[in-house]
Image: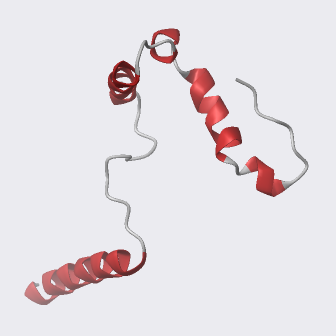
Amino acid sequence: MTARWSTKAVRNNFVTNRIVPIWNSLPEDIVSAPNRNTFKNRLDTFWDSQPMKYKYREPYLTGTGLKIYLAEIYLERLIERLKL
């Protein structure tokens, strides 16, 4: 797979351009999997053996969910300080 060259920054952020280096770095046995489930299983096994770059299994928080999460962390830290 090759990425298309572009003079526009917007084009460089397209999924097709971001995924090319990742796809090209995968071993041949993963890329040539006979079906989707085999591909997913082999990919998970491969990623488990690699150093973690992104915690893709962690929940993705945005908006209100992120605000609640950060408020909970703040309150936990505040409670810890008060106990000292």
Query: Quarter of the image containing the N terminus?
Result: top right
Residue 77 appears in which quarter of the rendering?
A: bottom left
Q: Does 34 sit above or below residue 78?
A: above
Q: Position of residue 43 (x, y in %)?
A: 40, 25
Residue sitting at 58 percent across and 31 percent down?
22
Q: Position of residue 36 (x, y in %)?
A: 40, 24
Q: Does 59 sit above or below residue 24?
A: below
Q: Is residue 52 left or right of residue 18?
A: left
Residue 8 appears in which quarter of the rendering?
A: bottom right
Which residue is most to the bottom?
82
Residue sitting at 71 percent across and 40 percent down?
17
Which residue is most to the right?
7
Q: Does 73 sit above or below residue 53?
A: below
Q: Which is more toward the observer, 21 or 35?
A: 35
Q: Position of residue 15 (x, y in %)?
A: 64, 45
Residue sitting at 46 percent across and 42 percent down?
53
Which residue is most to the left?
83
Q: Is residue 26 left or right of residue 77?
A: right
Q: Which is more toward the observer, 78 or 48?
A: 48
Q: Position of residue 45 (x, y in %)?
A: 32, 23
Q: Is residue 66 left or right of residue 74?
A: right
Q: Which is more toward the observer, 66 or 36?
A: 36
Residue sitting at 44 percent across and 14 percent down?
33
Query: Quarter of the image containing the C terminus?
Result: bottom left
Q: Which is more toward the observer, 70 or 44?
A: 44
How is the model colour-coded? Answer: secondary structure
Tally of marks: 0
Q: Does 8 sit above or below residue 42?
A: below
